[in-house]
Image (cartoon, rainbow, N blue to C red):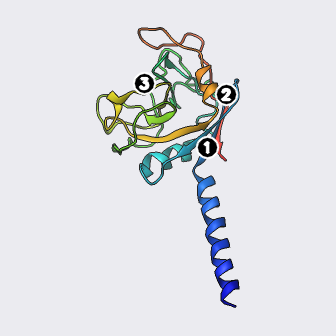
Amino acid sequence: MKKIIYLFIIFFIFVNSTIMANENIMILKTKYGEVEIELYADKAPNHVKRFKDLADSGKYDGVVFHRVIDGFMAQTGDVKFGNTKSPNFNLALAGTGGSDLPNLKAEFTDIAHTRGILSAARSADPNSANSQFFICFESAPHLDRQYSAFGKVVKGMEYIDKIKKGDPNTGSVAEPDIIISLKSK
């Protein structure tokens, strides 16, 4: 009987940890392919919750990568002005908007801004992150503990690398790539 209970406990732990692991995996579809992102809910719970809520409600579907700097990062997530499916879409304003939700307080962590890290975009105010985010192409240590890193690309970074790059000085992209869809796995 003890063996059965022991096996049941091990089985329960395994199933529960698998469910929990998949709970923090997102799939970002681009025209180049699918990108798998692992979210760090234990490090930045409020940013992860906001990101998942916006993604799972379809707010990121159709949003442009409005600022893309080769060797640095690809920025997206302006659900107000950057969503090509919205009547408010305005490429000239993309990057200045957010969601209808309040801004988030910074959640600075020990996560280094290395290749594939997902981090919250914001203005000069550390507590101004809302819906925008960026994915690092390369390490950017000057961003560590200055921006709220909350996830990492674990599969498909080669598709992020293909995103159309913007002006070398500003990162502004004339005919940007879009997020086809972004949802929980």
Q: Which residue is mark 3?
A: 96
Which residue is painted at 42% across and 24% down in the image? 96
Between marks 2 and 1, how big is the CA–CA gap? Answer: 13 Å
Task: Tell me: residue 154, above or below residue 171.
Answer: below
Which quarter of the figure has residue 19? bottom right
Does the residue at mark 2 contact the one at mark 1 (Cβ under 8 Å)?
A: no
Residue at (44, 52) in percent of width and height: 45
Q: Amino acid at mark 2?
A: Thr
From the image, tell me which residue sits under label 2.
Answer: 30
Depicted 59 relative to depicted 83: above or below: below
The residue where tag 1 is placed is 26
**Helix, strand, or loop for circle 2?**
loop
User: How far apart are the alpha carbons under marks 3 and 1?
Assistant: 25 Å
Most extreme residue toward the bottom is 1
Q: Is residue 184 left or right of residue 67?
A: right
Residue density around tag 1, few if under 14, some if 14–19, many if 20 or more, within 10 Å: many
Q: Position of residue 130 (x, y in %)?
A: 43, 38
Amino acid at circle 1: Met
Side of 152 relative to 19 (left or right): left
Q: Residue, x 34% and y 45% (percent of image)? A: 105
Which of the two labelled residues, at mark 3 and mark 1, occupies the earlier sequence position? Answer: 1
Q: Residue 138 shows which numbered tag? A: none
- Residue lying furthest front: 3
Q: Secondary structure at mark 1?
A: strand
Mark 2 or mark 3, earlier in chain: 2
Query: In front here: 159 or 83?
Result: 159
Q: Nearer the viewer, residue 133 or 143?
A: 143
Q: Position of residue 89 (x, y in %)?
A: 56, 22
